[in-house]
Image: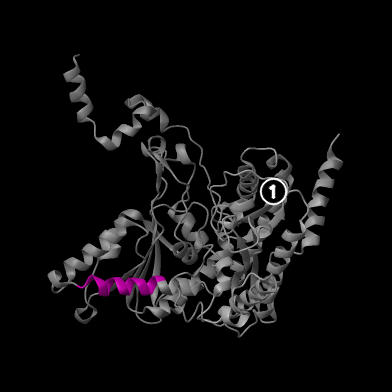
């Protein structure tokens, strides 16, 4: 065979099939028949779904109340390619997870559709009937079973059937093959008997395109279709799903406690790893790896990229390269959170003396940040505004900066709207909501978030900091290269705030004693 023949054969194979060339998969009829025989049933475990089913139904009921008569489409999202034919671990969109109760890796390409019904005739007396559309497990008699590396059981393990999901979630299920009709049927202007769609956009491009096409094909005047108006309708759905998560139910609060407990264990593992980190040329990676191992052992994943920042790197707010050394005498700022299998994440920061002992200047900065955190905690009471936490914390920081002679103006001028000079060393916000996303409820309206009233069931962070960069010539040299942040996860109750992460030491003396105790335990176990 000459080169021209080889080129012709290569060109005849579709490009998207060539990634399977490495598999060298047999294709004979004898192989296919043999592969389809003698298999026992496999059961996919679905832990925790019974407990969350009722809560998820109540959330769907709340959304139904807001969008009577409209079809709601909430995609889980597709698999995302990391490199060539390798995907990232799948995580569904948070709005989908919240309304279905599905965590871990369920289910790529799935879509939740809330179909409008007559008022009060839907699920749980609501105005919609919910159906979960997903791709069910292919049978052992199909080629997909052993040939599809993205969805075949031989490659990725057993998956739930439609019936299993329906039973465990108390939610109707349907094959993904019926999704297009379910989304597009009877689409049109309500005034002519059609159904309006609202979609959580930018989750699945294929669903975006399907909805856009349906809207275009049924428009009275498609050439003058105002896509901006339709996008605004969709944004209202995303906004509503975000606002629904501002108040956590009992099940969600337990998931938050689980994530926090695992995160506390992860911080302990980091302290155990610090002696090795001090000797490694990329000690920050040693720290990162120690925490990640605990996150995978106890939960699903990291809730976000770990910040393991030593020395001047701790003054970089989102330092996630974690390529630096950890040197004795420096501070290590560790901002990390375990994501539970339910996808709820913790978000905790502690600043640790790498050698176990704060220097006098480090302690001074640390205790100022701790005072600010305590002030924020005291301000966080039911009925106060969310923004009051930030005001209380940053006012304390401004006072300390003034005491140290670092502020170029008075405290009063600095904390005024026209001033803000103290923010040079604390430029971020002090709090954010926490839950399925590390920055949860991010699409909520300002009046319900930043200007919102603190209510029981809210979970949020309090995380003031001071960041004195080595390059900052506006401060004395003794401060330069010190970055401190203290972050805790707070549950608001009717009686006041509860620090979910209080098991991790916060006071400087307690931090030193905690670290020393861990090292003593390690020494006691040595032969």
- Residue picked out by circle 1: 270
In the depicted view, which residue is nearer to us: 404 or 318? 404
Q: Considering only vertical position in the picture, is 395 above or below 172? A: below
Image-quadrant location for residue 126: bottom left
Residue 311 in view in this figure? yes
Residue shown at 58% from the left, 79% from the top: 415
Colour approach in the figure: one colour
Query: In the orientation shown, which residue stands out farthest toward the top?
Result: 1
Determine the main secondary structure of the stretch shown in magenta: helix
Q: Position of residue 440 (x, y in %)?
A: 51, 67
Q: Would you say residue 288 sits in the magenta stretch? A: no
Q: Position of residue 509 (x, y in %)?
A: 81, 61
Residue 249 in view in this figure? no
Left or right for 74, reference 490? left
Image-quadrant location for residue 366: bottom right
- In the picture, which quadrant includes the N terminus? top left
Query: What segment carries the magenta color?
Result: 226-238
């Amino acid at each position: 065979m000459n080169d021209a023949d080889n080129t012709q054969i290569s060109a005849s194979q579709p490009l998207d099939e060539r990634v399977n060339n490495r598999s060298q998969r047999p294709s004979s009829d004898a192989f296919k028949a043999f592969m389809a025989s003698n298999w026992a049933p496999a059961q996919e475990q679905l832990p925790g779904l019974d407990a969350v089913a009722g809560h998820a139904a109540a959330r769907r009921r709340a959304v139904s109340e807001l969008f009577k008569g409209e079809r709601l489409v909430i995609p889980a999202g597709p698999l995302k390619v990391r490199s060539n034919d390798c995907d990232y671990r799948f995580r569904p969109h948070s709005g989908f997870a919240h309304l279905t109760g599905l965590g871990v890796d369920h289910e790529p390409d799935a879509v939740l559709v809330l179909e409008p019904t007559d008022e009060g005739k839907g699920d749980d007396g609501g105005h919609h009937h919910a159906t979960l559309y997903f791709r069910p497990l292919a049978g052992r008699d199909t080629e997909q079973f052993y040939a599809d590396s993205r969805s075949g059981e031989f490659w990725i393990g057993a998956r739930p059937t439609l019936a299993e999901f329906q039973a465990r979630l108390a939610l109707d299920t349907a094959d993904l093959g019926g999704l297009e009709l379910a989304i597009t049927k009877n689409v049109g202007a309500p005034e002519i008997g059609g159904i309006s769609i609202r979609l959580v956009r930018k989750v699945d491009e294929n669903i975006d395109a399907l909805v856009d096409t349906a809207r275009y094909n049924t428009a009275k005047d498609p050439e003058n279709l105002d896509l901006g108006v339709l996008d605004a309708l969709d944004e209202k759905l995303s906004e509503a799903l975000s606002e629904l998560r501002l108040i956590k139910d009992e099940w969600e609060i337990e998931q938050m406690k689980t994530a926090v407990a695992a995160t506390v264990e992860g911080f302990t593992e980091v302290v155990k790893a610090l002696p090795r980190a001090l000797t490694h040329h990329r000690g920050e990676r040693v720290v990162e790896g120690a925490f990640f191992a605990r996150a995978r052992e106890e939960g699903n994943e990291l809730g976000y990229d770990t910040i393991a920042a030593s020395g001047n790197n701790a003054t970089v707010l989102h330092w996630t390269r974690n390529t630096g050394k950890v040197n004795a005498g420096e501070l290590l700022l560790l901002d990390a959170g375990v994501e539970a299998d339910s996808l709820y994440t913790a978000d905790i920061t502690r600043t640790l003396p790498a050698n176990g002992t704060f220097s006098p200047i480090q302690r001074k900065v640390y205790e100022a940040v701790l005072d600010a955190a305590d002030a924020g905690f005291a301000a966080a009471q039911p009925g106060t505004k969310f923004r009051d936490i930030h005001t209380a914390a940053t006012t304390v920081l401004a006072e300390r900066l003034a005491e140290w002679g670092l502020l170029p103006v008075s405290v009063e001028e600095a904390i005024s709207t026209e001033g803000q000079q103290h923010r040079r060393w604390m430029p971020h916000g002090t709090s954010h909501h926490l839950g399925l996303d590390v920055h949860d409820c991010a699409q909520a309206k300002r009046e319900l978030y930043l200007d919102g009233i603190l209510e029981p069931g809210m979970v949020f962070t309090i995380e003031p900091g001071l960041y004195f960069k080595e390059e900052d010539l506006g401060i004395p040299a003794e401060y330069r290269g010190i970055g401190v942040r203290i972050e805790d996860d707070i549950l608001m109750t009717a009686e006041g705030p509860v620090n979910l992460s209080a098991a991790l030491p916060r006071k400087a003396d307690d931090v030193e004693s905690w670290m020393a105790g861990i090292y003593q335990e390690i020494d006691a176990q040595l032969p």
